[in-house]
Structures are given as C-alpha cells and as structure tokens.
Image (cartoon, rainbow, N blue to C red):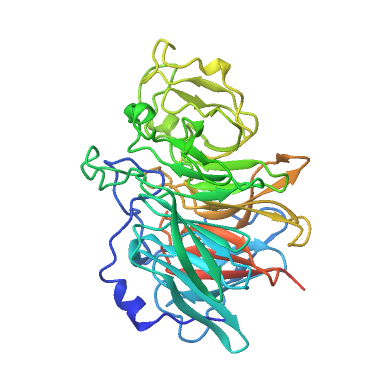
Amino acid sequence: MPVSPRPSHIGALLVTATLVAACSSASEPTSSPSSPSAAPSSSPTSAPQSGMSTVAVTVPSGMAQAPFDQPRQVQVPTGWQLSVWARTPRPRLALWAPDGTLLVSVPSAGTVLRFTPGSAGATESVLLDELDQPHGLAMAGSTLYVAQSDQVVAYDYANGAATGPRVIAGGLPDAKSPDLRGAYAHALKSVAVGPDGAVYFSIGSTGNISAADRTATPPRATIMRVPPGGGPAEPFATGVRNGTGLAVAPDGTLWTANNGRDNVADPSTGQVDPAYVGEHPREQIARLTPGRELGWPYCNPDGGPADLPFIRDVQTNPDGTKLDCSALPPVEQSMGAHSAPLGLSFVDGALPAPYAQGALIGVHGSWNRQPPREPEVSFYPWRDGRLENQQTLVGGFQGDNGSRWGRPVAAVVGPDGAVYITDDAADAIYRLSPPR
C-alpha cells in the first residue's frame, strides 16, 4: 500500500521552515548537525541486539528520492521487515482513525494529512489545513483532538472529514505570544484523552533552564488537564520540560516521555563537563498522577534505567531551597540522556510476542552529544502496570561516523497488525511488518 509524494509536497521541501528539535533550547540549532543530505553512511553503529537482524529497507518504485537513492539497512526483530510506505515532507505524530485511515500531523505545513489504504495502494489527502503548527492527535469515539501551538481543538470526525471545530483550550503560549517575543523552543504540543474523557495536553518550556516558565500564566513546562465535559485547563503535572510523548496506558494511566535539559553541571565539581553532560540527565518515561512533579529545572533524575531518584541541580538549585529533590517520587523508567523521545503510544495485544504489550517510542536522537545518541524506535515491555527496560525495535538510522539518514518521530500499530513509523528527516512513513 505505498503512497508516492504529491508534486506539491515535493516542492514544499524547498520552502518548508525547519522546526526546532524536541530536545533543544532557544539557543540551539534548528536542525541536526548530520542531516540526510550529508550522504551518511548506511552501516549501523553497532551489531544488532539479541533477537535482531539487519535487513534492507524495501523501497517501492517511485519512492527512491534521497535518502533512499542509495541502499539503506535497519536492525529489526528477526523475521520482521521494514518498507517505505509513504513519502511526505516532515511527518510528525500519527493516529489511526476508526475508519482505518492514518492521520499524520505536519506542523511545518500547518496540516493534518489523511492516508487511506486501498487495494491498489493508499491515497494521501489533506484533512485539515491552515492550522498553527498542529502536532498532537488524539481520538475519543468520533471526536478528533488536535493540539496546535496556541490551542487544542476538537472536531467531529466522520466520512473522512473533520468538522465542527470547537476550542477545548485556547490562548496557549507559542512564539506569537507577546511576552515571549518569538523565542519559544518547545512550542509543539501533544494531546491525549483519558478513560473518563478528560483531555490532557503538554505545554513545553521556552528554553533549557527558563525557570520563569513555572510561574507564567498559563504555566509552561506542564501537562495540563481539561475536565470531562469541558472547563478551564489546570496543571496536572509540573516540572515537565518537554513532554512531547503523551499517551494512555492499557490500565488507563497517563504517561509521558519527557526531554531533559542540556549542559547540566556535574554535581561533584559544579562544572559543565562534556563527559558528564553526555550521560546526564537521563530522559524520563514517567507515569503521571495529579500533582506529579518531575523536577525541572531544579532537580534531575539520576541512576536508572528504572526507578530513578532525583538529585539537586547545582546550577539552578544550589542550596536545595528551590525544590526538595529527595522528596520527589522516583521516575518509573528512562532512556539515555539526550535521546529526544517524541511520539509515545501503547500496544496491547496487537503485535506478536514478545512485543504484544508495551510502549512504542520514537527516539529522534541527540542534537549536540558526541558521539550522537542514535535515533531508533524503542520498545518498553509492559508488565503488571510497569514498563520494563528499553529495547530497540528498529535501529540503524545512524552510521559509524555519526551521520544519519533518518530520525523516527512516532510509531503506532495499524489495524493490519503492522507498525507505522513517521520520520521527519527522511520525509517518510515506514511500515514495519512482523512475520505472518
């Protein structure tokens, strides 16, 4: 069911504005130092983990534009295959609608796209356009929620159309907010709907250690909650620097994949040491409960990979009076520092063992770490309400020299039992198919 890029989308590559990377501050570059145009090596940086194999990416005719103008290989579970399913510029978060179509947000174009599979392939169309950086997508029954940079809007979704827009939460901060004067590193927002109908959405921090976000109106670096049936949005979790990954687990709990800060000082010396920065702080994968505090910018998770305690940030909380880090509950799970987790989704029985229950996370990879943290699709097994340690589901996007040909954003399971993965660096949507 391949989809070829529309001519207008190919042309859009030349004019699309570059979005700020998820794990970035206002002073950081807006693109990876190693882009697909840099003719990256296709060789993986490491041997596959146990139970994984290196396979060639299948590229249908008509989709061999860069980076697929040369052979590409990935690491996947043995017996699985990865193919290019669609080419479209800068796809981000994704959602399977009840009618069996894949909805994909494109913040850089202000659109939400709709991919309709068919016997002769799939058709791409524009579901919504002229939006302000649409990013997060969620569905509850026949209601589609779209998180834009400045508001969360609900639509009636039926017959392949989204109609009847109504603002669920408005006036959200973005680069157009007068007090921010265009400086907002984490304007993209995500959205999820709880089992009771409450709507949750993320508001990222304006920068790396912009502590004023915590007292802004509305507060930034938070996960906000709109009660069932509507009403004012209130903070649900705080100290969440950039909770781009936001999803409801099989047991109904809310989880976030959160991007930690950069250039944190070594608490033993008080100095910013690249060796320490490269491994600290780990990115948080946290269960959110009412009033949950994730520490930013005063406390950082330490240790891990699971049940990470918090320690004082010696730069922003030198005497511990800003926040008592030892009083914060440990973070449930994590991944390597500067991994830049983006899309988060849960699978509950739709994939074969050992991937039947767990979390899928698109790992964008680091922007400034040396050596660069690799992009991948990660899997965290779900056991008795807990996430077990990180595993690689799809790897191999980065070569031995640190250059990359792809950067996954989100991974969601389709009605056909395959995993669909967006990649905003390769301008592609992949289909990861398990053995039948």
Q: State whether residue 121 is above or below residue 401.
A: below
Residue 229, how many percent across, how many down?
Answer: 56, 47
Q: Is residue 396 visible?
A: no
Of 378 and 11, nearer the camera is: 11
The answer to whether residue 187 is seen in the rendering is yes
Q: Quadrant of residue 159?
A: bottom right
Looking at the image, residue 221 lies above or below residue 161 = above
Q: Image quarter for residue 289?
A: top right
Quarter placement of the C terminus: bottom right
Q: Position of residue 24 (x, y in %)?
A: 36, 43
- Residue at image position (34%, 62%) is 108
Task: Using residue 26 as the reference point, say whether residue 70 is left or right of it.
Answer: right
Q: Quadrant of residue 112?
A: bottom left
Which quarter of the figure is the N terminus placed in? bottom right
**Residue sitting at 59 percent across and 89 percent down?**
120
Residue occupying the point 68% across, 70% down: 415
